[in-house]
Image (cartoon, rainbow, N blue to C red):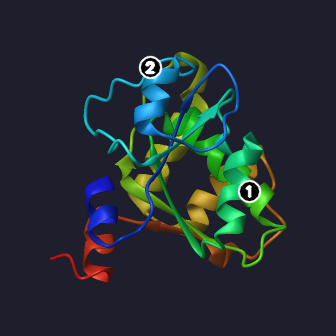
Amino acid sequence: MSEMARATNLTNIWVACALKNTPATTFKEAKRSRLFYDLEMEVVEPQEDELFFGKTQANAFLNMHLCAHIQEREYDELFITGVWANACVKSSIIGAFSQAAAWKPFPRISIVQDAVDIMSNPDYDDTMSSIRSMRRHKSPEHYLKMFNHSHPIKSRPRKNLGLISTEEFANHYGLN
């Protein structure tokens, strides 16, 4: 997904666990700063000049530097990917809706369903079954029900949340 975003001149923003919520820094500086817990990427590797934000909690949007960055640039769509669908991704999607309610324009939030990983953890069994069910139905409404179950998202219409696959993304941006 990151390669496709680069090919379409979209901005890749990386978020990782850190000792504190950090303002934008380059990946090169993030690796050197030692503020981040683990920046060894097994599947993808950020480019040295791509932006990195540190987060101290599962919800990336509790980092106000990240929120300010997105709002200042008036992004009209966010494509969310990541690991720990049952914790970090779920919390970040809820956080995006909570924060974005005040943003102009209110961005569409798209979850790239095949670029989100589910990690096994017995503490998250309920969420795991909800996400597996979402993958079967592939319905934004169903996905929203899952998030509404743990946190009501009432600030904006449901049309602002969508699911997209990497293939649909590639088709939309003419990357076939």
The image position of residue 126, as x and y in percent, is 60, 33
Task: Give 49 or 14, whichever is nearer the viewer.
Answer: 49
- Asked if residue 85 lies left or right of residue 72, the reply is left
Circle 2 is placed at which residue position? 38
Which mark sits nearer the N-terminus, 1 or 2?
2
Of residue 7 and residue 98, the one placed in the foreground of this image is: 7
- Closer to the camera in the image, 172 or 56: 56
Q: Nearer the viewer, residue 9 or 29?
A: 29
Residue to which mark 1 is pinned? 68
Task: Residue 32: give x, y in percent of width and height.
Answer: 45, 22
Task: Look at the image and tell me in which quarter the N terminus lies.
Answer: bottom left
Residue 120 visible in this rendered orientation of the protein: no
Q: Quadrant of the C terminus?
A: bottom left
Q: Position of residue 88 (x, y in %)?
A: 58, 36
Amino acid identity at mark 1: Ala
Mark toward the viewer: 1 or 2: 1
Q: Secondary structure at mark 2?
A: loop
Residue sitting at x 36%, y 50%? 115
* Side (left or right) of 43 relative to 35: left
Q: Assess disc 1: are there few (<14), some (14-19) or many (≥20) residues with their C-alpha within 10 Å of its C-alpha.
A: some
| Residue drawn at point x = 69 percent, y = 29 percent | 57
Tell me what residue is drawn at x 43 percent, y 63 percent: 138
Amino acid carrying mark 2 in the image: Asp
Alpha-carbon span between mark 1 and mark 2: 24 Å
- Residue 50 placed where, x, y %? 42, 49
Residue 156 at least partly seen: yes
Q: Give the vertical position of 110 relative to 117 (above or below).
A: below
Q: In the image, is residue 83 above or below residue 17?
A: below
